[in-house]
């Protein structure tokens, strides 16, 4: 039994990818081969059933099934476009649940993705049980990593003035406010970081802005500073509009926590 567990873990871990934001995903074409499907046409039918199942749940389909066309080389140096999907762990779970469990590799896949999906659910449950300050710290780390990646993408896209680039994003999300405007509105002290002085909900808004801007810059192959700044503004404004459509609280109307994360971290060290 242990041998089977090690085998399945290695098999599906070997084809797992990690994106620039640290999120894991699988490619449908690679999963198809591991599951021993010979024809994309047949495997695509299984994917469509899985998408229908996802659609009938409380999950957003586009969070788990991302269409990803790519070019492959064929005879005499020519290329052909083929369809592929970028799949979350949950998407893989739904796919294997729609395959024939009597086939050994399918049964193993069902076990693997069921266990891994359950682990993710437990992780989310653990997050929900965190205090507000613990959630802030977790999301601040996410924002820090996201900004590091976004800065690299922005520079590769032709951005030379990163301060202006980031202000374009803040303006879109905060109805015209720059980082300095947010700093003054929050009444922060000299050199305090505005992200260290946001609650978990406001940080989540900014994480979404950061991730979607990074993805669009790469997807559109942006190669100049003007367009990069425009993309950051437009994506951030779209995030703001989405919050409004959903009846959420505008970022600038969310309360500023009494203590910054730097203060909390300092207090925590003093207690140790």
Image (cartoon, helix red, strand yellow):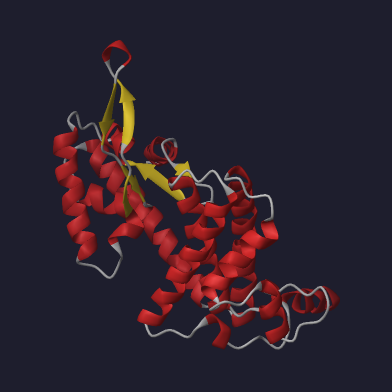
Q: Is 20 or 37 nearer to us in this picture?
A: 20
Quadrant placement of the C terminus: bottom right
Question: In the picture, residue 100 is in which quadrant?
Answer: top left
How many numbered marks, from 0 up?
0
Residue 39, image x, y percentages: 17, 30
Q: Position of residue 254 (x, y in %)?
A: 56, 86
Q: Which residue is at 46% across, 41% downward?
A: 17
Q: Is residue 26 left or right of residue 82?
A: right
- Quadrant placement of the N terminus: top left
Quadrant of res 16: top left
Q: Residue furthest front?
A: 226
Q: Quadrant of residue 187?
A: bottom right
| Residue located 17% across and 58% down the image | 52
Which residue is at 63% across, 68% downward? Answer: 140
Q: Is residue 198 left or right of residue 85?
A: right
Q: Residue at x 40, y 81 (%)?
A: 244
Q: Given the current orientation, which residue lies at the most extreme top position?
A: 76
Q: Is residue 52 left or right of residue 16?
A: left
Residue 27 point in image, percent of width and height: 35, 40
**In the depicted view, which residue is nearer to us: 80 or 53?**
80
Q: Nearer the viewer, residue 9 or 203?
A: 203
Q: Is residue 253 visible?
A: yes
Residue 103 falls left or right of residue 92: left
Residue 99 visible to an observer of this rendering:
no
Q: Nearer the viewer, residue 168 or 106?
A: 168
């Amino acid at each position: 039994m242990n041998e089977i567990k090690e085998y399945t873990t290695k098999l599906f871990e070997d084809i797992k990818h990690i994106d620039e934001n640290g999120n894991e995903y699988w490619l449908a074409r690679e999963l198809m081969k591991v599951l021993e499907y010979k024809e994309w046409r047949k495997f695509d039918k299984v994917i469509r059933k899985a998408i229908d199942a996802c659609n009938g749940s409380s999950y957003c389909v586009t969070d788990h099934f991302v269409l990803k066309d790519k070019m492959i080389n064929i005879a005499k140096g020519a290329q052909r476009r083929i369809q592929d999907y970028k799949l979350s762990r949950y998407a893989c779970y739904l796919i294997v649940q729609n395959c024939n469990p009597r086939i050994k590799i399918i049964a193993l896949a069902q076990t693997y993705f069921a266990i891994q999906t359950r682990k993710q659910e437990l992780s989310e449950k653990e997050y929900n049980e965190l205090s507000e300050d613990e959630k802030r710290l977790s999301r601040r780390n996410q924002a820090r990593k996201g900004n590091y990646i976004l800065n690299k993408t922005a520079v590769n896209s032709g951005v030379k003035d990163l301060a202006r680039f980031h202000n374009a994003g803040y303006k879109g999300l905060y109805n015209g406010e720059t980082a300095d405007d947010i700093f003054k509105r929050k009444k922060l002290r000299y050199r305090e970081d505005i992200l260290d002085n946001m609650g978990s909900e406001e940080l989540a808004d900014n994480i979404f802005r950061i991730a979607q801007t990074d993805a669009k810059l790469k997807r559109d192959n942006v190669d100049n500073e003007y367009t990069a700044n425009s993309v950051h503004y437009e994506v951030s404004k779209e995030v703001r509009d989405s919050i409004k459509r959903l009846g959420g609280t505008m970022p600038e109307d969310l309360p500023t926590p009494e203590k910054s994360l730097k203060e909390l971290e300092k207090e925590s060290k003093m207690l140790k």
